[in-house]
Amino acid sequence: MPLPPSLPEPETEAGRAGLAALLADPARAVLALDFDGTLAPIVTDPQDARAHPEAVLALGRLAPRLAGVAVITGRPAADAVRYGGFEGAAGLAGLTVLGAYGAERWDAADPVVRAPEPPAGVAAVRAELPAVLAESGAREGTWTEDKGRALAVHTRRAASPDAALEQLRAPLYALAERHGLMVEPGRMVLELRPPGADKGAALAGFVRERAATAVAYAGDDLGDLPAYATVAALRHEGVPGLLLYSAPETPTESVERLHACADVRVAGPPGLAAWLRAVADAL
């Protein structure tokens, strides 16, 4: 079918095939999205993040037509549900939120967060982290977000966020290694979390669960690269896929790796909301 003018044509042949498959048979397609930087603008305090209201409305129009819609995030699932305004939202009765990189799950049809207990290493890192930051000379404006299953050290409030983050990189990696955790890098943040869960595995499981024959994924940061890799792997298996990059206003070299892999680039959460609205119109 011809694309409406408001729906940008993917830059790659594989992306065009993915979009065509989604539009041709939406009832067998899965749409998955990151939260921060994709559905919600990046803000100084993560507790102030809110999903773009137009994106939530568009998802409410799309979800009943699709095999499944999932939000896949490093946040605790309950936080994403609350900050996204997803519970009880029109059209999102079938929404799934996979939090903590897939270790936690919330379904709108049965709104209880399900997750295994975090490993002991998380508690050990929680206890040692303040001393490690002090000994490393963490700069003013550096602060820690306790996610329950992970600890995230943010530097976006510092005078020089990138320099402040680089100063902490080695000691935080060493701390994580001592306690069997891994470090998830992001924009002005290093997150210490348990290994064994990532957005790629979470997406692959959701696609299998819904028996989807097409998949679209939207992300904005390095933690989304495993999901991008899953879409690439599914393409090799004959499942058409579409990759969207929610580009920040000031992209960094590392985050631009997503642009190199993506089929469609949109201008942050407002751009993604417009894309979702255009797909809903096309269907």
Image (tube, helix red, strand yellow):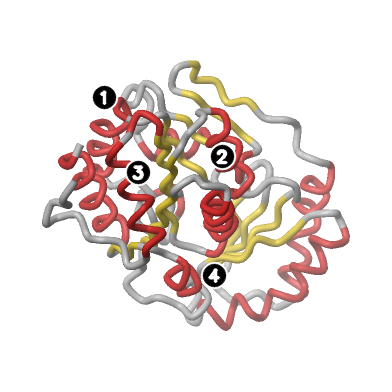
Helix, strand or loop status at disc 2: strand
Pick whichever of labels 1 and 4 is earlier in the sequence: 1
For the residue pair 275 and 173, the one nearer the viewer reads as 275
Pick whichever of labels 2 and 1 is earlier in the sequence: 1
State the residue position of label 2.
Answer: 99
Residue that sits furthest to the top in the current view: 110
Q: Residue at x 59, y 78 (%)?
A: 164
State the residue position of label 1.
Answer: 90
Pick whichever of labels 1 and 3 is earlier in the sequence: 3
Marks 3 and 2 sit apart, C-alpha to C-alpha, by: 27 Å
Residue 200, compared with residue 185, is above or below; it is above
Residue 77, compared with residue 235, is above or below; it is above
Pick whichever of labels 2 and 4 is earlier in the sequence: 2
Q: Amino acid at mark 3?
A: Ala
For the residue pair 218 and 161, the one nearer the viewer reads as 218
Give the crowd class for mark 1: few <14, some 14-19, many >=20 residues within 10 Å: few
State the residue position of label 3.
Answer: 21
Q: Residue at x 70, y 62 (%)?
A: 183
Marks 2 and 1 sit apart, C-alpha to C-alpha, by: 21 Å
